[in-house]
């Protein structure tokens, strides 16, 4: 069974600070996705990374896929209260297309 | 509608009762997924439908769980003889037919919050 471990599980910081969330596995994934989920809603896709070492930026969010495609990170610069939510990483195994493996999530709270 | 819809949004039931949860995917999306999300946790895959292929039921936790899909439209997830440990948010997602790379976006519904007393 392929697992994705996210850390930290909970993070509460002040507005304006920077933070990094990690998603790690011992398995290789063909792609990795990051979702954000707000209370009472389903997850919404933020980004998909496919190539080892790939870096994608979405405004203040920077996503990186590890060179070996086993891990990923999400870095937020100058966090804002609107960034509050549950961040989930999800990996597509090398076999079994479209059946994503989800991490347990990082619950992020940005305090004004 | 424009997105995935699920009903009911909330369901409270007594232990031992059967429940049926409904998912309306985005029109034209051939793939449909059901997930379970326990409080404070990530998503647990339950079942996957792709077109007319046999569904992938490998994530169903017990034979009390079953799901059906009519063509490429509505899906229902049925839980028989509910137990307290079935309490969770049940999320449905749909995606358009994918490439072999499987880099498809999954569009999630808002979920059904099930509480078994």
Image (cartoon, coloured by chain):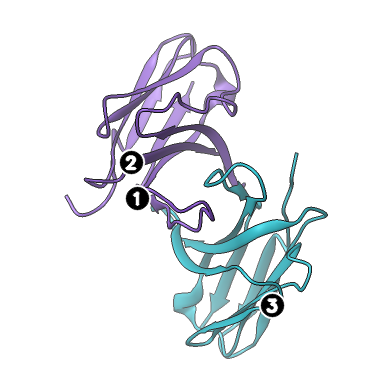
Q: What chain does mark 2 sit on?
A: B
Q: Secondary structure at mark 2?
A: loop
Circles 1 and 3: CB distance less than 8 Å?
A: no
As measured in the structure, the alpha-carbon distance from the residue carrying label 3 to the one carrying label 2 is 35 Å
Horizontal and vertical percent position of residue A99: 55, 43
At horizontal 72% and vertical 53% (from top left) the residue drawn is: A4
Marking on residue B115: none
Q: Residue furthest left?
A: B1
Q: Which residue is identified by label 2?
A: B30
Colour chosen for chain B: purple
- Asked if one can make out residue A22 in the rendered structure from this viewpoint, the answer is no
The CA span between labels 2 and 1 is 5 Å
Residue holding disc 3: A20
Secondary structure under the numbered disc 3 in the rendered image: strand
- Chain at tag 3: A
Q: Residue at x 26, y 31 (%)?
A: B74
For mark 1, does the 10 Å Cα neighbourhood hold few (<14), some (14 to 19), or many (20 or more) residues?
Answer: some
Label 1 resides on the chain identified as B
Task: Say the numbered circle drawn on residue B96.
Answer: 1
| Along the line of sight, the residue nearer the viewer: A69 or B101 | B101
**Chain appearing in cyan on the rendered image:** A
How far from the left and from the top, in percent, is residue A31? 61, 61
Q: Residues within 10 Å of mark 2 (few under 14, many from 20)?
A: some
Q: Is residue A26 left or right of residue B6?
A: right
State which quadrant residue B11 falls in: top left
**Residue B29 location, quadrant:** top left
Residue placed most toward the observer, A43 or B94: B94
Mark 1 → mark 3, Cα distance in angstroms: 32 Å
Q: How many marks?
A: 3
Q: Is residue B73 left or right of residue B82?
A: left
């Amino acid at each position: 069974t392929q697992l994705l471990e996210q850390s930290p599980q909970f993070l509460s910081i002040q507005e304006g600070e920077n933070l990094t969330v990690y998603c790690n596995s011992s398995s290789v994934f063909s792609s990795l996705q990051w979702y954000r989920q707000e209370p009472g809603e389903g997850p919404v896709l933020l980004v998909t990374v496919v190539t080892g070492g790939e870096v994608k930026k979405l405004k203040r969010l920077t996503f990186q896929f590890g060179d070996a495609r086993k891990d990923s990170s999400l870095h937020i610069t100058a966090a804002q209260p609107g960034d509050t939510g549950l961040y989930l990483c999800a990996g597509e195994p090398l076999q079994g297309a479209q059946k994503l493996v989800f991490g347990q999530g990082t619950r992020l709270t940005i305090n004004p | 509608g424009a997105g995935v819809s699920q009903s009911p949004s909330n369901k409270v039931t007594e232990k031992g009762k059967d429940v049926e949860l409904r998912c309306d995917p985005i029109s034209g999306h051939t793939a449909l997924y059901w997930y379970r999300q326990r409080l404070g946790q990530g998503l647990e895959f339950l079942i996957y439908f792709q077109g007319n292929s046999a569904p992938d039921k490998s994530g169903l936790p017990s034979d009390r769980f079953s799901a059906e899909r009519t063509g490429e439209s509505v899906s229902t997830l049925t839980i028989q003889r509910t137990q307290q440990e079935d309490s969770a948010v049940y999320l449905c997602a749909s995606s358009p037919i994918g490439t072999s790379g499987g880099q498809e976006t999954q569009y999630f519904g808002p979920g059904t919050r099930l509480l078994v007393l």
